[in-house]
Image: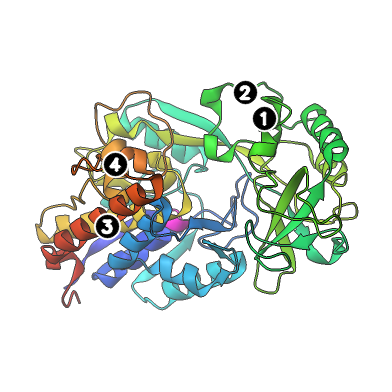
Amino acid sequence: MQFDQVTVIGGGLAGSECAIQLADRGFAVKLCEMRPQVSSPAHHTDHLAELVCSNSFKSTRPDSAAGLLKAELERMGSVLLDCAHRAAVPAGGALAVDRVKFSELVEAEVAARPNIEVVHGEVTQIPEGHVVIAAGPLCSPALSEEVMKLVGGDALAFFDAAAPIVDASTLDMDVLFSQSRYEEQGSGDYLNAPLNKEEYEAFIEALTTADRVVLKDFEGGDLFQACQPAEEVARTGKDAIRFGAMKPVGLTDPRTGRRPWAAIQLRAENKEKTAYNLVGFQTNLTFGEQKRVFHMVPGLENAEFFRYGVMHRNTFVDAPHVLDSTFAVPGTGVRLAGQITGTEGYMEAVATGLLAALNTYAEAIGAAGVELPRVGALGALVGYATDPATVGYQPMHVNFGLVPPLEDGKRRSKRDRYQAYADRALEALDAYLATRSDLFGGDRS
């Protein structure tokens, strides 16, 4: 069956997943990506599905909300999740990817579908017909203004940050050691830069007094909590980051045979391990200050930077009050997907792109829209993001705080409770998908 063309604006995670899913369901898709003609403060390439922050898609543990979301997306047929698995690099219990390979795999999936036309150039006006705006939180000012006119609400904004990436060949491997927390020394997928108390205190002093790019003292609402700059965390107390990104628990410095006072972990960017990012060290420091401050860390004295950390302003709409339950703008042919809806996170962006395609297809065949069980990770997130009763809306990623409580009344440990959430969610999702062969099964060509 063939359908009218759908214009998808934005070639990031949400837009790429949406375009692929629409194409597989018989739509002609015009996928618009403004890069390389117009770039953003955070992008470094013109590739589709570029990861601008971390290279991690978070945990794969089945008893975590992030792991549950991946299990749900696998059942729903996400193509970008499959690309992530094929581009995976070692990262302990997390799904991390080689950024370049991941983008290449996504672009290959798009190219393999002749009914997707990729058009490079800035979209400054929302076109007629069926449109999915997946421009992300860094959409151009002109398009952002058009979106705000369309939804009739206020633009909300927060600041987001990315961590530096360093050249592995310039690291001092006589100081750094390989170990994931709680694993045997010499094993694991992370490098660790150990600091003693004096080194840590000098580093924190330099970190908190260094020159910043965005010269302001941030309030809680300005920063998305999952991506706070390291210097902002450190300003809350001299040991705050030592109980966060620099916690030494589960690590042993082979030089001393003891746990270090603090440690910075580095995660590989690719399978060849030629580049590493500084885990949890998103930053707003100037490039010169990043070089000075991070060179104070043992093992990083001569580190060369492939990419310095950056900070940028992200925009999202007040989804609970301007979008319907399918992220559509009521009374228009426009639907939103990705982080511009306020759903925060890589896999969450993939998920909303998938949902945008499914709901567009449902409209085309006269079927009911997707109503995922609220006990699931994605169903709970969508419910929160589209519930008019939600007040003080801020960017949100999947978490078990959004799901309804268990009903059996049993007292459980945290891990058992989370596993029970996951078991309940997948059982409910399987039951729901079995009733929606119109969207998820059969021959759609």
Q: Is residue 199 magenta?
A: no
Q: Marks 2 and 4: CB-CB under 8 Å? A: no
Read off the magenta span. Answer: 10-14
Q: According to the image, label 4 marks what residue? A: 411
Q: Given this view, does label 1 or label 3 mark the residue nearer the observer?
A: 3
Label 2: how many residues lie within 10 Å, few (<14), some (14-19) or many (20+)?
A: few
**Residue 280 relative to residue 254: left or right:** left
Which residue is at the front of the view, 304 or 105?
A: 304
> Which residue is at 20% across, 77% downward?
445
Dot 2 or dot 1: first in sequence order is: 2
Using the numbered discs, state the Cα–Cα distance from disc 3 to disc 2 in whole angstroms: 40 Å
Circle nearer the N terminus (4, 1): 1
The image quadrant of residue 431 is bottom left
Foreground label between 2 and 4: 4
Type of secondary structure dominating the magenta stretch: loop
Identify the mark nearer the N-term, 2 or 4: 2
Look at the numbered disc 3 and give the secondary structure of its residue: helix
Q: Which residue is mark 2?
A: 218
What mark, if any, has residue 232 been given in the picture? Answer: 1
